[in-house]
RNA sequence: ACCCCGGCCUGGGGU
């Protein structure tokens, strides 16, 4: 069962759902009985692909075969509804789970994340208070989710207050919590607050990761602070020994293009490839827009052909 | 008998 489940998991993460389903059939034929883990893997994959109806079909199938769903099954389904912004369906499931069997911290975090991504911050906050009443202790993920949620609706001040509340409860913000807040500061035009938080985070002994650096490089470019954006990009490798990833490069390429430095952007685009970081659809779109803005449609056409040849579609 | 060991679910960045 474990071997089959691992194989199915591999196929699912590669979005090869057809083959995963075939394997699920094959194992039954070979008298290897799929257990709740196996079904959970498939259900979660369908949910992440936005196919909750298919996930429900598997859910029914497992029940018919006498395999009982567990909390992870329900968590995946809830998350599936949340990802489609069908929050009321998610909430129904949430309510029946909290009434019946044991919810887990994941159950709360998923539902809170659903509200946050849907901009329904009051309901998200309510759930935070709700869980404390039921002796569930919010964790770093809970707070980071809410910090991100407040930032997305422009309520950076509330996000900062939440960070304090979190500390007051004895929880330390991690690199994701800081990343969310720094990103929110950049979006709302408080880049210097973001930089101060970056310093604070390093002072507290946390090592910034490539995501935090990318957020700041992007924020600095968008604030028109070219020199500092370039410095931040260099420091990521020089100070921390980190490697820029495809998104960091895209941010740099986009910044250079928007500052009229299309040739340098193009050099960086090729440097990224040479250093083994393969451009994705977004990187192509960024550089193509750069060429189009600077009246170089011929280069743009070449790149569009190249990206289509690689299986990406231009936007 | 007891303990340990394998597979499932949640948070931040680019057009």
Image (cartoon, grey):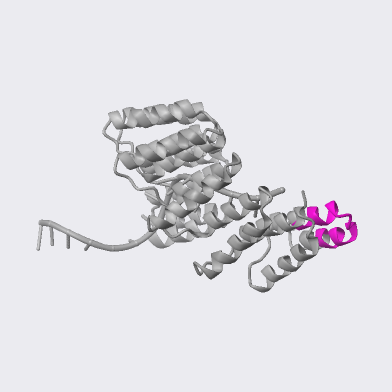
Horizontal arrangement in the rendering, residue A67 relative to residue A197 (left or right): left
In the rendered picture of this protein, how many numbered marks are placed on residues? 0
Q: Pinpoint residue A203: horizontal percent, then vertical percent.
A: 40, 56
In the rendered view, does A300 fall on the left or right side of A160? right
Quadrant of the rendered image containing residue A118: top right
> Is A16 on the left or on the right of A240, as rendered?
right
Which residue is at the front of the view, A184 or A12? A184
Q: Position of residue A216 (x, y in %)?
A: 57, 53
Give the answer, above or below, for where A171 lies relative to A311.
above
The answer to whether residue A14 is magenta is no
> Where does the image place residue B7, in percent across and percent down from the top left?
39, 57
In this rendering, does residue A310 appear at all? yes
Q: Is residue A146 visible?
A: no
A54 or A66: nearer the eye? A54
Q: Is residue B7 above or below residue A65?
A: below
Q: Which residues are magenta?
A: A287-304
The residue drawn where x is 53% and y is 36% is A117
Residue at position x 40%, y 51% from top? A174
Location of the N terminus of chain A by quadrant is bottom left
Q: Is residue A62 above or below residue A212?
A: above
Q: Is residue A297 magenta?
A: yes
Determine the main secondary structure of the stretch shown in magenta.
helix
Q: Where residue A75 sits: x, y (%)?
A: 42, 40
Figure check: A120 above or below A277 = above
């Amino acid at each position: 069962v474990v071997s089959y489940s691992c194989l199915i998991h591999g196929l699912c993460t590669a979005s090869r759902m057809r083959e995963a389903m075939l394997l699920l059939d094959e194992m039954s034929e070979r008298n290897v009985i799929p257990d709740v883990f196996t079904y959970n893997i498939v259900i979660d994959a369908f949910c992440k692909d936005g196919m909750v109806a298919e996930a429900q079909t598997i859910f029914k199938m497992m029940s018919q075969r006498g395999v009982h769903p567990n909390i992870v099954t329900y968590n995946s389904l809830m998350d599936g509804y949340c990802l489609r912004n069908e929050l009321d369906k998610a909430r129904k499931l949430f309510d029946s789970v909290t009434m019946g069997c044991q919810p887990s911290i994941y159950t709360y975090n998923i539902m809170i994340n659903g509200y946050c991504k849907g901009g329904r911050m009051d309901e998200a906050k309510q759930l935070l208070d709700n869980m404390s009443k039921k002796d569930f202790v919010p964790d770093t993920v809970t707070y980071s989710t809410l910090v991100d949620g407040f930032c997305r609706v422009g309520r950076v001040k509330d996000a900062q207050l939440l960070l304090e509340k979190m500390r007051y409860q004895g929880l330390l913000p991690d690199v994701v919590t800081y990343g969310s807040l720094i990103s929110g500061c950049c979006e709302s035009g408080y880049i210097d607050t973001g930089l101060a938080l970056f310093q604070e985070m390093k002072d507290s002994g946390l090592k910034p990761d490539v995501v935090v650096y990318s957020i700041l490089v992007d924020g600095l470019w968008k604030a028109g602070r070219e020199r500092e954006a370039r410095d931040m990009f260099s420091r990521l490798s020089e100070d921390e020994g980190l490697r820029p990833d495809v998104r960091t490069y895209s941010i740099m390429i986009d910044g250079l293009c928007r500052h009229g430095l299309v040739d340098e952007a193009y050099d960086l685009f090729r440097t990224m490839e040479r250093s083994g970081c393969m451009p994705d659809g977004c990187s192509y779109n960024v550089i193509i827009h750069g060429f189009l803005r600077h009246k170089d449609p011929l280069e743009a056409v070449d790149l569009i052909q190249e990206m289509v040849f690689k299986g990406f579609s231009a936007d």
